[in-house]
Image: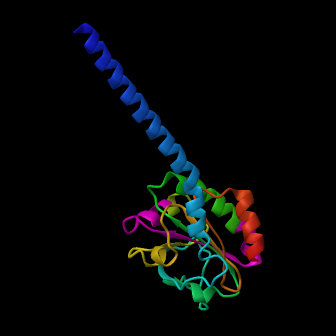
Amino acid sequence: MATEARREDTVSSAIYAVAGAALILGLLLAFAWLPRLLHARESEQVGKDAPAMNVPIVYNGEVLATAGGEPPKSIALSELKGHAVVLDFWATWCGPCKAEAPILDRVAARFKSSGLVVIGVNTDDGEGEGAAWAKAHHLSYPIAFDGDHSAARAYQVEGLPTLVVISKTGKVIARRTGVTDGEELERLVNQAL
């Protein structure tokens, strides 16, 4: 009986080892193919006209003003023709989004005189959360609130942060999911200008 019990333990251990190896292999394959799948999805809009978007501005960062000098209540992408635009879809609960915000802030300030407009599109937060976070962190670019997720749907946002770079002619020239470093963002902005 003791031999039979040892044999059952050995078989059970082997089954667990094979199952564990299969799980690890599956995860490795998923992580290997996930970037390719995301990149394929991200490239669907590249080269095409940017989808229409009209979202309320909840924090201005003293960047945008109407012809009368007043801060706008909302921003429509169609109003920004002739400007390179960076849309950053983000949320306050998203750690990578918060890590990317200072990078966006530096790029927005550096290229403002060249006509770049950076807009943080706060999505997946409650009303007022994105504005409070942007104000507390002294962001210089405006924050829009996508409360109904219409902008996120139009830009097929599936993960945060998602960055969309739009040329002066209104074409999407790049999309990135995850943190985009400053050097890469500057390269994309130079392409858009």
Q: In which quarter of the image is residue 37?
A: bottom right
For the point 48% across and 60% down, the residue is: 133
User: From the viewer's perspective, is residue 110 above or below residue 9?
Assistant: below
Residue 11 image point, x, y percent: 34, 23
The figure's colour scheme reads: rainbow
- The residue closer to the viewer here, 5 or 107, is 5
Q: Specify whether residue 146 is in view.
A: yes
Furthest toward the left, the residue is 1
Q: Quadrant of the N terminus?
A: top left
Total marks placed? 0
The range drawn in magenta is 109-133
Residue 111 image point, x, y percent: 74, 70
Q: Specify whether residue 177 is in view.
A: no
Q: Is residue 29 magenta?
A: no
Q: Does the magenta stretch include residue 114?
A: yes
Furthest toward the top, the residue is 2
